[in-house]
């Protein structure tokens, strides 16, 4: 699991994004595929996860969510908007 410190796309306050990924760029998904143990690990590291209703995907799923404005990061944005920039040094991250 990787936890990325990035600005919220909506309010620009810092939020934490948890993904099942590694430093090679391999991405398995976000909270929507986490086990209970992985959710707990992410939350212990400051990630706010809750069920989000995606109108784009026409479904509800667990998502990384901003504590300030309640905006969530949709699963279609993980790689290009968070993982790749983190791996290129634009965002701080840690591997758990």
Image (tube, rainbow, N blue to C red):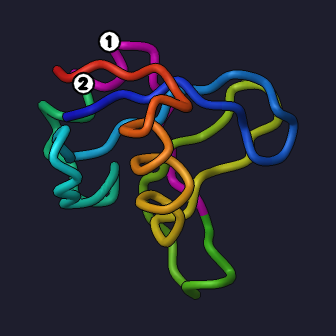
Q: Which residues are magenta?
A: 41-52
Identify which residue is drawn at 45% across, 15% down.
46
- SS type, badge 1: helix
Q: How many marks?
A: 2
Percent from the top left, x then y, of residue 27?
22, 58
Q: Percent from the top left, x then y, of residue 13?
A: 78, 24
Neighbor class of circle 1 (other Cα within 10 Å; few <14, some 14-19, many 20+) is few
Which residue is at a point 64% across and 50% down the rendered structure image?
72
Quadrant the N terminus occupies:
top left
Read off the residue under disc 1: 44
In the image, residue 49 lies in the stretch drawn in magenta: yes
The answer to which quarter of the image holds residue 28 is bottom left
- Single out the residue that lies furthest toward the front: 88
Q: Which mark is residue 94?
A: none
Please name whichever residue, 21 or 50, is drawn nearer the observer in this view of the structure: 21
Magenta-span inclusion, residue 39: no
Viewer-closest of 74 and 24: 24
Mark 2 → mark 1, Cα distance in angstroms: 6 Å
Label 2 with label 1: CB-CB less than 8 Å: yes
Horizontal and vertical percent position of residue 51? 51, 53
Residue 63 vs 5, above or below: the answer is: below
Check the picture and name the quadrant holding the C terminus. top left
Task: Look at 46% across and 20% down and name the residue there.
Answer: 92
Q: Is residue 19 left or right of residue 15?
A: left
Give the number of the disc on residue 40. Answer: 2
Name the secondary structure under disc 2.
Answer: helix
Q: Residue at left 40%, top 47%?
A: 83
Q: Is residue 52 left or right of residue 19?
A: right
| Whether residue 26 is situated above or below residue 19 in the rendered picture | below
């Amino acid at each position: 699991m990787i936890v990325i410190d990035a600005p919220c796309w909506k309010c620009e306050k810092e939020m934490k994004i948890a993904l099942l990924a590694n430093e090679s760029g391999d991405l398995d998904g976000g909270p929507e595929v986490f086990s209970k143990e992985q959710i707990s690990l992410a939350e212990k590291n400051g990630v706010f996860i809750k069920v989000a209703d995606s109108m784009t995907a026409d479904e509800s799923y667990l998502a990384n969510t901003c504590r300030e404005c309640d905006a969530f990061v949709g699963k279609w944005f993980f790689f290009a908007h968070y993982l790749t920039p983190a791996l290129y040094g634009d965002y701080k991250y840690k591997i758990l």
